[in-house]
Amino acid sequence: MGSTERIRNVAKRVAKWVRAGHQLVVVPSAMSGETNRLLGLAKELAPDAHSAEHRRELDQIAATGEQVSSGLLAIALQAEGVQAISYAGWQVTIKTDDSYTKARIQSIDDARVRKDLAAGKVVIITGFQGVDDEGNITTLGRGGSDTSAVAVAAAMKADECLIYTDVDGVYTTDPRVVPEAKRLATISFEEMLEMASLGSKVLQIRSVEFAGKYRVPLRVLSSFTPWDIPLAEEAVSGTLISFEEDEKMEQAVVSGIAFSRDEAKITVTGVPDKPGIAYQILGPVADANIDVDVIVQNVSHEGRTDFSFTVTRGDYNKTLELLKNTVGPSVGGLDVSGDPKIVKVSIVGIGMRSHVGVASKMFRVLSEEGINIQMITTSEIKTSVVIDEKYMELAVRALHKAFDLDAPAAA
Ligand code: ASP
Ligand code: MG
């Protein structure tokens, strides 16, 4: 939605689906760069625009981006001869809680939308926003239009939710790191959830959680294909995030390699090994709204142990200070150190459930590259390691190749 020309193309694409007999609800995000521009204006007036004091107004401002693109799309559709009507979140109503800048959708009233659809209209609903119980406008966090779209699809019990974006699907890993990465025609919902939470930025993670909860079939596809490609081709393009695991039987054990640079490690040594200590240390961290990810605790020697955990890089200094200044003195004898230059690399695949030795193969590949593993966590369908950031690309490339994910060389 970068320009009026692009909006016209979106309208032509929508019209193509309508003419094929589909009922459509369209959830636009803002025109590209617009949300940044709007938030930038606020920052010019208050450098701390993101502080709690200003958040309500930030949402008031940021939500306008989607209102503009929705109205423009409605006009473009009308100009194409398609009946269309646009609504802001509060008009639908899309009810959210009151956590400005990261609100969660609580309910969607589908009555108005159904009435318009029945009258033959395309309904356009602003992405990214809603309204709280008091009538305040809220936004869902950056990338939140994905979540709006899935939530609307769930409320409407849509056959499928199509997310048109700037990539043409979900890849085995980031093609900027591994040029041989290939697009997946399908990925299971659980794998997608892992990929999204492990740093693959194709969709806002909440949208994937929502799709899982309400079993909304979700397809990620490119908004850059010409609008007039045949509908049958478009309908099967991109990546389908599906709930049908058996389709995957023939596929690889590992479906993708995810990574996240947004990690930092904190190590606490000399921790008394007795009940309640993990809570005494991590409780205040949680109370400060800091998300803790990988946690590793060692066996103790002489009643003392150490443990390490990871946080996002943005929370690194805050966590370090909290532990050094507040928690350390109260627990006594703690030594706190950290490393903000680490990354997390993960292999993901539902095939790991039924295959042994997948994690050990990962460790072997890393050791052959001389990469030291600092921390490990596993779940049923993923294994993650924490390593020095300077080895990230090497690790991702080596794993991608070792797990047979490289696309076959062109003949
Ligand atoms: N416009 C919002 C953003 O830039 C929401 C979205 O694009 O999904 O984050
Ligand atoms: Mg987006």
Image (cartoon, rainbow, N blue to C red):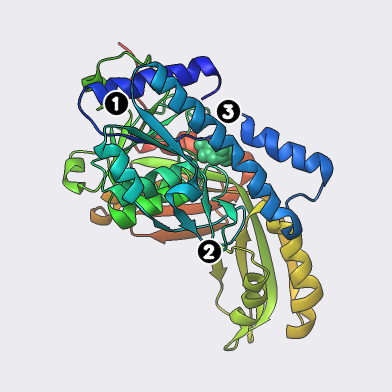
Image position of 392 with respect to 375: above or below: above
* Horizontal side of residue 182 vs 145, given as left or right: left
Return the mark for residue 237: 1
Q: Can residue 348 be seen in this view?
A: no
Q: What residue type is labelled 1?
A: Ser
Residue 331 picture quarter = bottom right
Precedes in sequence: disc 1 or disc 2: 2
Name the residue type under label 2: Asp
Measured as percent of width and height from the top left, residue 59 is found at 63, 49
Residue on which the image places disc 2: 133
Residue located at (50% from left, 30% from top): 71
For ligand 1, tell me if the residue under mark 3 lies within 8 Å. no
Q: How far apart are marks 1 and 2 (CA)?
A: 40 Å
Q: What element carries label 1?
A: loop
Image spot of residue 19 (x, y percent): 24, 21
Q: What residue is pinned by disc 3?
A: 32
Looking at the picture, tell me which residue is in the foreground, 302 or 187: 187
- Say what secondary structure mark 3 lies in: loop
